[in-house]
Image (tube, rainbow, N blue to C red):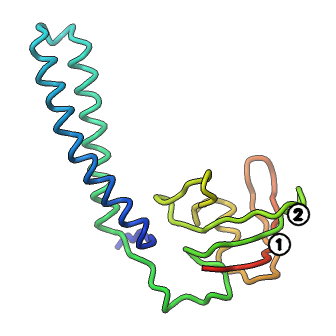
Amino acid sequence: MEKLYVSREGLEKLKAELKECKTYRFKVADVIEQARGYGDLKENAEYHAAKEEQGMLHARIANLEHQISIAVVMDDENIDPSKAYLGATIRALNKKTNREVTYQLVSPVEMDMAAGKISVQSPVGKAFLGHPVGDTVAAQVPAGVLEFEILEISR
């Protein structure tokens, strides 16, 4: 069975977004109802735009419900904290730029590059997984190969 490993915070974020989407769909339904009153539906741009938005919203709701149904909150008891793992914060030296970077390894649904949260399914995230402090890892990215030396692993 398919599983989506997430942090407790990540699962709560998914649930909050689902609740928000379900509330918003009533507003979209009201817009559709109002647009119906504008006349001929064949040439009613407001109606078609609202119906398109409704379709995308329903798809997002279905996707969120699926993600929540397969979500498994990571259990800290079975993790070896000496190696990079989902949920860990990694401080590393980018060998190409000689600059330190800090990333938190998260599930794809929690990814937020601006906040330093990278997916464990990204090339860099995959490269870090399972490696201890002191290891040098390589990640194949579109711009070439990036090498990082792991300096610290923390929760």
Residue labelled with disc 2: 95
Q: Is residue 60 above or below residue 30?
A: below
Taking 2 as reference, is 38 left or right?
left
Residue 99, given in percent of the width and then of the height, sits at 85, 60
| Identity, as a three-letter code, of the amino acid under mark 2 | Lys
Which residue in the protein does label 1 denote? 149
Residue 12 horizontal/vertical position (percent): 36, 65
Residue drawn 82% across the image and 74% down it: 136
Please state which amino acid type lies under the numbered disc 1: Glu
Q: How crowded is mark 2: few (under 14 residues within 10 Å), some or many (20 or more)?
A: some
Dot 1: within a 10 Å radius of its alpha carbon, few (fewer than 14), some, or many (20 or more) residues?
A: some
Judged left or right of residue 13, residue 49 is left
- Left or right of 4 on screen, residue 34: left
Q: In the rendered image, which quarter contains the C terminus?
A: bottom right
Q: Quadrant of the N terminus?
A: bottom left
Residue appearing at x 62%, y 67% in the figure? 104
Mark 1 falls on what kind of element?
A: strand
Distance, label 2 to label 1, CA atoms, is: 7 Å
- Figure quadrant of residue 125: bottom right
Question: Is disc 2 placed on a helix, strand or loop?
Answer: loop
Q: Give the image location of residue 119, x and y in percent.
A: 57, 61
Circle count: 2
Of the numbered discs 2 and 1, the one sitting upstream in the chain is 2
In this picture, is 135 found above or below 97? below
